[in-house]
Image (tube, rainbow, N blue to C red):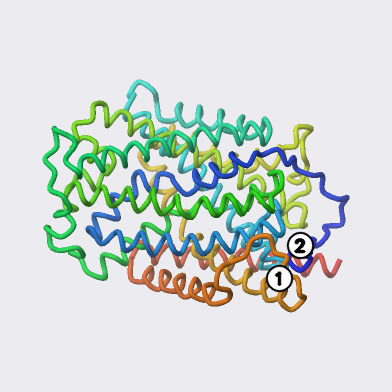
Amino acid sequence: MTDTLVSTPPSSGTAQAPRLQQAMRPRQLVMMSLGGAIGAGLFVGSGAGIAVAGPAILISVLVAAALVVLVMRMMGEMAAANPASGAFSVHAENALGRVAGQTIGWLYWIQVVIVIAAEATGAAAITAATLPSIPQWASALFYMVVLTGVNLVGVRRFGEVEFWFAAIKITAIVAFLAVGVAMIAGWVPSFATTGFTNLTAHGGFAPTGIAGIAAGLLIVVFAFGGTEIIAIAAAETSDPRRNVGRAVRTLVWRILVFYIGSVLVMVTILPWTSEDLATGPFVAVLQAGAVPGAAAVMTVIVVVALLSSLNAMLFSASRMIYSLSHRGSALPAFGRIAANGVPRNAVLASVAFGFVTVALNYVRPDKVLPLLLNAVGSTILVLWTVVTVSHLVLRRRARRNGTEDSLPLKMWGFPYLSYVTLALLAGVAALALFDTAARTQLIATGLLTAAIAGSCLVLSRRRSAA
């Protein structure tokens, strides 16, 4: 019915790949997709966005949210039609060829491996600051061991852990929104509300102009990285054609409510110039409302957000290198599956760098996190661009072959909104060129992508010659 989108990846010459377990429940997939979208970028990064854009950060959030919703809809269309552990890497290979698919697969894997280490280090640094008696390296080691174990015990148990991680984050945001609305409405006696005057009272709605909105957009866009897990997890959920569509639709409105609602509460309750808002936006708002224990509670929530992302990213990385193995681009050992349906070697390979950084946390705990964050780069722009181009190619192919009407989930306004997405991505990349840090990361990502593509091309030619 959807054969144009469900072509089998090229054979690696080995026996047919053993199947991953389709044991993830629909509620776990939905919550996992939300957990990927709601992470430290919202809890911490939103303050940095407000500091550069003022209340106009709301415009940045709206544009970034529209972009991620469009990309996720396209990704969801392809994942529902062809649920594969390599997700967008497999779709790119089907649409653009072996080299393109394997390049984006390896680029994603490298980025996620670094993110895993960064999140373990970030969580450990917060733990060490809160509990000085526990060394940073010890916390990092503990978190790495526990979440590696979670990823090795089976997809259903992994999904349950990630479900509760996401539930904690969502509960915290809902409570924050409720307290924030009560403060704005004047229902909190300890807080003297100023209504909505903070939106325009300190230099206007856009005090730093277009440049500030653009800088805020860069911060917010990169904060949305992680939503792609929904496409990767589709291969291990029952009835992916139905459940992926459900998860994508749920993700759309909850992103709008949680992200836009949270930021609106922040810039309404406190002046955008508040130093506390810039460094810890959630804590600043709750402390303004005299909420007892706000700092301690939000510290725990941020650690949970980091560990949730680490857990999900380890899952994503292991499935990507598993898929690359079965397409002949990684060692065959990474394609083997244990008796419980887990690609054990792929998990261990994906977490290895995280354990290396545990040692680095022992030697130089103050230097590890900045280095890791700078190394992540702007791969999300490359990933989303490849997703969009792959979708355009595969959808047109389905239209030519007469199978378009049978797609279980469709992108809206095809092809016009797909081209709008490409234009937005090009705009974000152009803005990045005018920001020193973002420009450096963009250039580094471009060089890394070119190096990976060159290696994949050489490997592909050697395989063809053999």
> Which residue is located at x 77 percent, y 76 percent?
401
Q: Considering the image in quadrants, where does the C terminus appear?
A: bottom right
Q: Quadrant of residue 173?
A: top left
Mark whose residue sits in front, 1 or 2: 1
Answer few, some or many: residues within 10 Å of disc 1's Cα (few below 14, many 20 plus, some between 14 and 19). some
Please determine whether, in this image, residue 128 is positioned above or below residue 320: above
In the image: residue 120, left or right of residue 82:
left
Q: Position of residue 452 (x, y in %)?
A: 62, 63
> Which residue is located at x 82 percent, y 44 percent?
18
The three-letter amino acid code for the residue at tag 1 is Glu
Answer few, some or many: residues within 10 Å of disc 2's Cα (few below 14, many 20 plus, some between 14 and 19). some
Q: Is residue 381 or residue 463 the one in the foreground?
A: 381
Q: Considering the image in quadrants, where does the N terminus appear?
A: bottom right
According to the picture, the residue beneath numbered tag 1 turns out to be: 404
Q: Which mark is residue 135?
A: none
Please determine whether, in this image, residue 465 is positioned above or below residue 360: below
In the image: residue 448, left or right of residue 302:
right
According to the picture, the residue beneath numbered tag 2 turns out to be: 6
Q: Is residue 186 visible?
A: yes
The three-letter amino acid code for the residue at tag 2 is Val
Q: Position of residue 42 (x, y in %)?
A: 37, 47
Q: Is residue 458 visible?
A: no
Q: Position of residue 187 (x, y in %)?
A: 19, 37
Q: Is residue 398 or residue 296 the one in the foreground?
A: 398
Q: Position of residue 352 (x, y in %)?
A: 60, 39
> Which residue is located at x 34 percent, y 24 percent?
131
> Which residue is located at x 36 percent, y 59 percent?
61
In the image: residue 277, left or right of residue 76:
left
Return the disc, 1 or 2, that comes first in the chain's sequence: 2
